[in-house]
Amino acid sequence: MAGPTGRGQSLGAALNDLLHSQVTPRHRLSSYTAQHWHAQLSHLTASQRGHHALEDAGLNVTTKTLINWLSDPEYNVRRSYIDVIHTAYENAAVVPADPIPDHIKNGQFEISGTVKTGDDERERGTRRAAPLRIDGSRGHWGAINELWLAGELTDEEFEDHFVDDVIVSDIGEGTDGWEFPGALYDVEVR
C-alpha cells in the first residue's frame, strides 16, 4: 500500500512537498493586514487568540483603559503601548507549524530520481533500478524539525540535512558522499 508521497525538481523540494502534504507549516494568517494600532487592537480583542497574544506581549491595562482606546481611534496612547499592540498583532498573525509526525521520522523512504555517489550515478525507481531506500528511524531529525518549526526549512536546507542526518545515519557516507543532481524526484514514505 502506497504511503504519503512528495514530488519536486530537487530532492529537497520533493521532501518539502511530502511534509506539506502531511502537516501544516508555519504560516501567516491572511486576515492580519491592519496597519493602524486601533485596527490591530480591535482585531486582537475580537478573539481569544488575540487576547492571549496581547497578554503574552505584556499589555497590562485596565478594562476601562482598553474600552477607552477601542472607542476612539484618535485616543492618545503612549508609544510603548502601541509597540506592544503591534508586537501582539504580529505574533497572533503567525500560526506555528505542526511538528513533524513520527510516521514520517520513522518511515521507510523510497527515493526515485538521479542518485550519485562517487562515480556511480544512476536513475533510481525505474524498471531497471529500485528506488533508494532509507530508514528514517535511524536518522537524526533534530535540525530538520527545528528549521521546520521556525518556518525556515528551505528545499536546500532540507536536502542537506536529510543527506547528512538521515541518509548517512542509515547507510553511510557512500563512496564520495551523496548527491541528487537530477531534475525530478519522487519520495514515498511507507
Image (cartoon, grey):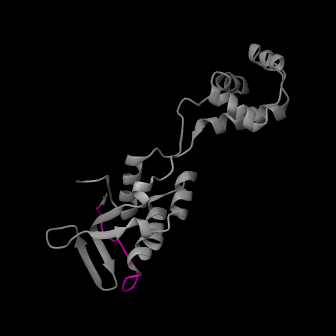
Secondary structure predominantly adopted by residues drawn in magenta: loop
* Horizontal arrangement in the rendering, residue 170 relative to residue 93 (left or right): left
* Horizontal arrangement in the rendering, residue 40 relative to residue 181 (left or right): right
Residue 117, position as x, y percentages in the image: 34, 81
Residue 52, position as x, y percentages in the image: 69, 32
Q: Quadrant of the N terminus?
A: bottom left
Q: Residue at the left extreme? A: 127
Q: Looking at the picture, does residue 62 appear above or below residue 132? A: above
Magenta segment, which residues?
173-186
Q: Quadrant of the C terminus?
A: bottom left
Report which quarter residue 83 is drawn in.
Answer: top right
Is residue 175 at all visible to an observer of this figure?
yes
Q: Is residue 174 magenta?
A: yes
* Horizontal arrangement in the rendering, residue 89 relative to residue 162 (left or right): right
- Residue at image point 64% right, 26% down: 48
Is residue 35 at all visible to an observer of this figure?
no
